[in-house]
Image (cartoon, rainbow, N blue to C red):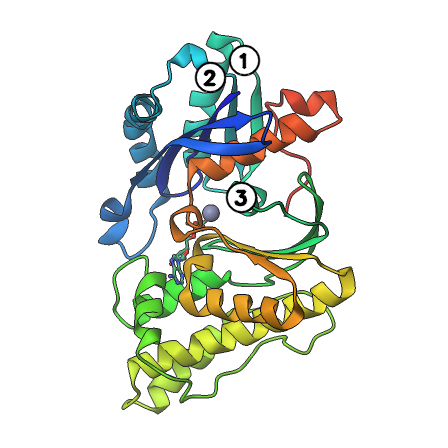
Amino acid sequence: MNILGIDTSCDDTSVAILKYCQISRKFHIKANIISSQVKAHGEYGGIVPEIASREHLKNIKTVFEMALEKAQVAESDIDLVAVTAGPGLLGSLIVGYSFAKGFTISKKIPLITVDHIKAHTAANFLSPFDINFPAIALTISGGHSSLSVLNSPIDAKFIGGTIDDAVGELFDKIARYLKFPYPGGPYIDKMSRAGSEKYKLPRPLINEPNYNFSFSGLKTAVINFTQKNPGYDVSDLAHSMTAAICSVFTKKIRNAADEYKARTIILSGGVASNSMIREAVTSLGEKLKVFVMIPEPVLCTDNGVMIAISGGLNYLYSPDKNLKNTDVYPTTRW
Ligand code: KG4
Ligand code: ZN
């Protein structure tokens, strides 16, 4: 079965084509094309929604044709289309959705609408290893920081998330404050490698008996620290901030793994590319003797592959026939 996955939720126009093998029950990437809009938004220091939707409109057909070419697949070979329905920028989502809808109507094939956050987690189904359930999944991106429990490929229960800024927002806002280009997460990551935890920063909500996160106070604490200590070292600051984030994530994952008797810990989303966070969660897994799965960095940030997998899993595993051809927003939201 060939699955087309489309994501236009934010600032990347992403189209992928995957083959699902019924025998191995695994997904294989045939094409993964991502057209980044970083240049278009860079001078504004953040994403401009109107520019994003116009760029998607300009690029989507070309990106789709590049994916067909790369996969060596004809339009008539596509069996199923999965597209992000949300969350995301409305004008951007509409471009991908309309394209997918038009294509599926003309080809008379099913369209599955996908939740972008759940799809980030689904990127881990590319692993040659099977996911043992229950799994604790932390999805961390520019717009979300969500913790959930997975009981099957399509059964996810949200147990906590950020009550203010997403962790990617914290990385990007601090990077902008420190005058790094947009998006700043990767720059903070690079700086942190050369530093150490010289400054003690707060770990918001770390001891709260729930799975919520808060990163707005940490952002203020970092800014206040730089104003009171003008001679600070930027690498040590990047390292100290990321160490505070790692402490919060590992504590909440450990609590959730204990409570839900997790057999797997899953990390996903753009911020899961962060090297300190990857190391911290991997070493937590070693301590707890729980298998940790994290996609390679290119599959952490937004891509069409994860959308194709998420749609494919819903199509294959859902006992609900209505889910096999959806063109409405998914009912379960994270
Ligand atoms: O998942 P994603 O591509 O888009 C959203 O769904 O939001 O995540 C983008 C976010 C941005 O905030 C970016 O700065 C952050 O992921 N990011 C990183 C790293 N690479 C990307 N943050 C920290 N360290 C990184 N290496
Ligand atoms: Zn994302």
Residue 50's place in the image compared with 109, above or below, is below
Classify mark 2 as within 8 Å of ligand 2 or not, answering yes or no: no
Image disc number at residue 109: 1
Q: Earlier in the sequence, mark 2 or mark 3?
A: 2
Q: Is residue 301 left or right of residue 322?
A: left
The one of 212 and 264 positioned closer to us in this rendering: 264
Q: Would you call the spot at circle 3 few (<14 residues within 10 Å), some (14-19), or many (20 or more)?
A: few
Secondary element at image label 3: loop
The residue under label 3 is which amino acid type? Pro
Number of labelled discs?
Answer: 3
Q: Which residue is drawn at 62% across and 23% down?
A: 326
Pointer 2 and pointer 1: residues touching (CB < 8 Å)? Answer: yes
Mark toward the viewer: 3 or 1: 3
Location of residue 229 in the rendering, given as x and y in whole percent from the top left corner? 33, 91
The residue under label 1 is which amino acid type? Ile
Gap between marks 2 and 3, in whole Å? Answer: 24 Å
Q: Residue at x 65, y 63 (%)?
A: 290
Q: Earlier in the sequence, mark 2 or mark 1?
A: 2
Classify mark 3 as within 8 Å of ligand 1 or not, answering yes or no: no
The residue under label 2 is which amino acid type? Ile
